[in-house]
Image (cartoon, helix red, strand yellow):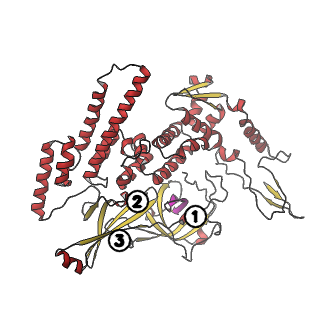
Amino acid sequence: RIQLKPANRTHSLQRESPSKHASIEHTLNLYIKIIQYSASISFIVHTMFPSSSSSSPSQIVLHDLWKALQDEEIRGDLQLVGRDGVRVSANRFVLGARSEIFKRMLYGDFREALQTEIHLEQYEGPILQAVVDFCHSNEISQFTVLYLSQQTELAGRRLVQLYKAADYLQIGGLAELVEGLVHNRTTRFPPLACAIYDEADLDTPLSKDALLMIQCRPYVTLPPGSSSFGGISCLEGMKLRTLFVDQNVKAGELFLFEMLQKWSIIKKEQRRQQREHDDEEKKDNTNNNQEEEDDDEINAIVKECASHLHLEDIEPQDLLSIVQPSGFCSTKAITKAITCQALRASTNHIWSLSSRGRPNNIERILVEGAGSQDANGIYYYIDGLANGDLYSKREIVCGQQYVYTLSISAAGKSQQKEDNDMTTECRIFCSKLLTHDGCQIVATNKYHRRHNNNNGLFQPLLQIIDIKTDDDSDYALLQLSDGDHYLHGKIRKSARSYNLKHNTLIKVLRFSKYAPTYSNSNDDNQIAIHLKTISVVSLDPGHKFGNPVYYFDVFDANEFDDQDDVVMLTG
């Protein structure tokens, strides 16, 4: 509550009481909102827990509970011990209130209910500290400072470990928060997708997102950087195999083979360094066979992965000069590949190589060595030009949408006469299709809540990066991204709204704004949008981007109700 007393006038602003469904962290947080009138205005700020006699009993109890949590003696009545021996102080009551698993453990028939020291061997100290911080304050600020300021493999793995802990302990909001952080990290630093994919369990949201990033952008996610940054060197045996079996990785076979070579070199070096470290600790150098065993294990993994390569899609000279000397593929397999290439050329009367990626029924061109790794990849035929063809490559992943256009046309007539041969000219153009700062423009202060966009002056192109539906609700809840920021939203369910999926591109033609009545954010100025009319952009690689499939979901503006109890997405 804020009371402002400029001159002889008193202005008051009372925060709306939280919903009965709001979680305890929203109830315990202090809210102070300062309204600036002028530099000369004096004001008195009260917290939501005033100590006056007018306070309700529940407010007094909540105030005392929050005050007690600041006392280290009360807050630290329980010790959590990780497998690294790190001890983390916690409050038994708070952990039980925030986690169903902790509630059963600390207040059930388990032996932990009588202990003041709980050993959780599956987690290390930093993960336990983040779990306790979130339970106490709904924030992981210390974890953020330690890891999210870095772009290292360790930072990516720590995020996945925290997600696993939140999921197992059933801590509401923490898993969703980490999932959103992982989205942001892999978008900004694509090579971290390999570390996250390796650490995450298969068929989890984190694993699926990381794999999608690798499939769509292999030329920026797989090349290894430094030993701590990411790339294919983060993958271990089983996850590496799944990648080479996957036919949706949009990369050339030679590129994948070269990545496999680099993985082998890096892993052997890492094993050598580990052996030296172990020998120094033991002061023992008796295990002379360990190096040979490690090399045999790595070579076995490499050969198995290489067996899934389509050697017939590698140029013959590269097969003989690069692939054969490595020893990863047998001479018989290389000979068979060259024979297959000759047979295919004889049958089709043209020399061509295929590549991975879908769909197969559209003419494709593989671009490699373009100078920029982002420009490399598979381009799909979309249209014919007067003197050539036009191809397009789109990368739709983690809230980013770029389109690369390849123009292949005949060179000028004068140059052709000089060369006495038909020459072609290739140009690659790149453009970002999502509306720049679209989410910020929607949520900017110069637009008011409940502002309707019926005039159609601002129609941002956004991407759906998350969508959730509830059988008990008439609305589907969305996260919409402009590539750099995201915004919450909703759309009424209908037969056509079920066509909206993860990564769908939409042009927002008509919308209204509202303030969510319940969210995990303490920002009183949070804005969400209610989609009224949108157009869904076709994602088929063989279609021009400018030909969207229009989808209308029109409602009377007076029908829109701001007071729906909407559970907003987090992340």
- 276 vs 543, nearest the viewer: 276
Q: Amino acid at mark 1?
A: Gln
Q: Is the N terminus in the top left, top right, bottom left or bottom right quadrant? A: bottom right
Please rate how many residues cluster around mark 1, counting C-alpha atoms within 10 Å: few if below 14, some from 14 to 19, many from 20. Answer: some
Residue with the mark numbered 1: 440
> Which quarter of the picture shows residue 91?
top right
Main SS of the magenta part reads strand
Q: Earlier in the sequence, mark 1 or mark 2?
A: 2
Residue with the mark numbered 3: 544
Helix, strand or loop at mark 1: helix
User: What segment is highlighted magenta in the picture?
Assistant: 475-491
Residue with the mark numbered 2: 396
Relative to 410, say whether 442 is above or below.
Answer: above
Relative to 382, say whether 52 is above or below.
Answer: above
Q: Amino acid at mark 2?
A: Ile
For the residues labelled 1 and 2, the Cα–Cα distance comes to: 21 Å
Q: Left or right? Give the position of 411 relative to 270.
A: left
Q: Left or right? Give the position of 13 relative to 362.
A: right
Residue 388 on image: x %, y %: 26, 75
